[in-house]
Image (spheres, rainbow, N blue to C red):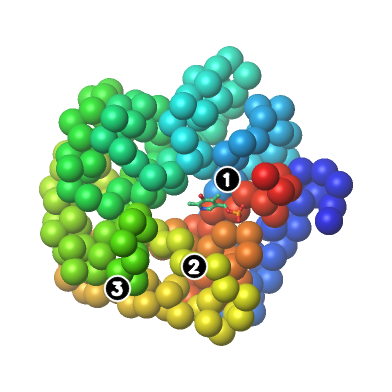
Amino acid sequence: MYATIAARLDYVRERIAQAEARFGRMPGSVRLVAVSKTVTMEDILRARLAGQTRFAENYVQEALPKITGSRLAGQGLEWHFIGPLQANKTQGVATHFDWVHSVDRPRIAQRLSDQRPAHLAPLQVCLQVKLDVEPGKSGVSLEELPELVATVAALPQLHLRGLMIIPAPCNDEERQRLPFRRLHEVFQQLQAQGYSLDTLSMGMSADLEPAIAEGATLVRIGTAIFGMR
Ligand SMILES: *Cc1c(COP(=O)(O)O)cnc(C)c1O
């Protein structure tokens, strides 16, 4: 393992570039979002100094001091919310984030749009999808996806960008690719229906290569940049 955040960030960029080359993807077609949950502001600044501008957080309470505090404000950072969303947390997301990847029901989408301040650009939205019907797991089912897509596409302060998935961990690269492939198919079906989606948010530290192989345009990487949580 490399010793510094800058070196680990370089290595992650190299992994992304190699996966793009290996799987016939355009160079630079996969964006890197650094997942900074539990990470200190000092370490976020270190990543910023190494050129990283996109960061993601899972918990509103933890994220707000980072986003609004004087250390990181004005650094030109783009903030992505990727955690589970309860109705009582939508205000903070709508007010302080640029993106949200975890929208999974119409009521949450409606609140985010209503609460998004008018002077800000629309919130950029990915819908979190679950492919298997495990109760309690977050994500919209494929059955309920069409209604959610239609709802979000019609909301004035939301801009629907694409789909997100967090598959169950698995060590076999061929098997890791299956849920990503399925999500890509669903994504293409929606595009064929006329939705102009451009973001497939899939791939984390342990499965970024299979995700890129199957069409990821955005990977969310924590551990490989900031170390074990
Ligand atoms: C924590 C988290 C990540 C990053 O996972 P790593 O394995 O640390 O790279 C990505 N996406 C979501 C939704 C997460 O909660």
The residue positioned 63% from the left and 19% from the top of the image is 71
Q: Which residue lies furthest to the right in this view?
A: 3
25 or 174: nearer the eye?
174
Residue type pointed to by label 3: Val
- Give yes or no for contact between labels 3 and 2 (Cβ–Cβ under 8 Å): no
Q: Quadrant of residue 169?
A: bottom right
Q: Where is residue 43 in the image (x, y as percent from the top left)?
A: 71, 33
Element assignment for label 1: strand
User: Quick one: label 3 or label 1, which is nearer the N terminus?
Assistant: 1
User: Quick one: label 3 or label 2, which is nearer the N terminus?
Assistant: 2
Cα gap from disc 1 to disc 2, whole angstroms: 18 Å
Residue type pointed to by label 1: Val
Q: In this view, does 167 lie to the left or right of 105?
A: right
Q: Residue furthest top?
A: 70
Q: Residue 168 carries which label?
A: 2
- The residue at which mark 1 appears reads as 35
